[in-house]
Image (spheres, rainbow, N blue to C red):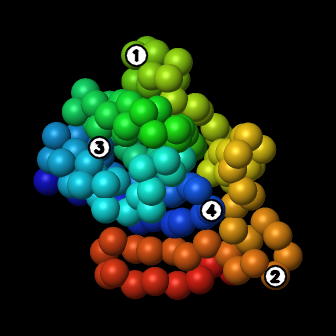
Amino acid sequence: MPSLDMRHQHHAGVTVITLAGELDLSGCARLGDYIAEVRQTPADHLVFDMGEVTFVDSHGLRVLLDAYTFAQEHGGTVHLTALRGLPAHLVEITGIGDHVRLHTSTEIALAAISVMPDLPSPAGAVAGVPGPVLHDQADGGTRRAR
């Protein structure tokens, strides 16, 4: 059974979740729990880096829409980045892009969020502020971005 790998980074007011593998029924419950666990506050903006996602089914879309609904209720937003192949096609034909924000890269999403009203710039954008803290679900390791 193909797996879903998840990693996250925290920035000021933003949680970036990088996904790899298949976003289907087998990984959706884990992803929903993971989002709830790693989000720093209910108002966090969520960025899903989808560059390494090879497949998304209706269950995967439901988790992303649930994250969107929760974010909207708490003043946050949801951004999908680096969509390609079948996941990009599914997002296009279902109209999900009418609700979540789509970007070609995580860096562009972070830049878009940083200019949103009432949100501080992401950590690392100011000289002397350390970069984001990177987390890897697989080994629980933590390291500082360079």
Q: Residues within 10 Å of mark 3 (few under 14, many from 20)?
A: many
The disc at residue 23 is 3
Q: Label 3 vs label 2: CA separation?
A: 37 Å
Q: Eyeballing the image, is 32 above or below 92?
A: below
Q: Secondary structure at mark 1?
A: helix
Residue in the picture at 45% in, 22% down? 96
Q: How many numbered marks, from 0 up?
A: 4
Mark 3 and mark 4 lie on one chain; the one further toward the N terminus is: 4
- Mark 2 or mark 4: which comes first in sequence? 4
Identify the image quadrant of residue 30.
bottom left
Left or right, 84 with reference to 55:
right
CA gap between label 1 and label 4 equals 31 Å
Q: In the image, which is nearer the foreground, mark 1 or mark 4?
A: 4
Secondary structure at badge 2 equals loop
Looking at the image, which residue is at 28% across and 31% down? 62
Residue 57: quadrant of the picture: top left
Does the CB distance between marks 1 and 2 fall below 8 Å?
Answer: no
Please provide percent x and percent y for residue 138: 31, 74
Could you tell me if the residues under marks 1 and 4 are in contact, i.e. CB atoms within 8 Å?
no
Q: Does label 1 or label 2 sit earlier along the sequence?
A: 1
Do residues under tags 3 and 2 come within 8 Å of each other at their CB atoms? no
What amino acid type is highlighted by mark number 4?
Ala
Check contact, mark 3 vs mark 4: CB within 8 A.
no
Residue beneath label 1, please? 94
Instruction: Say which of marks 3 and 4 sits in front.
Output: 4
How packed mark 4 is, by other alpha carbons closer than 10 Å (few <14, some 14-19, many 20 or more), is some
Give the CA distance from mark 1 to mark 2. 43 Å
- Mark 2 and mark 4: Cα distance apart in space: 15 Å
Which numbered disc flags the more N-terminal residue, 3 or 1? Answer: 3
The answer to whether residue 80 is seen in the rendering is: no
Residue tagged 2: 128
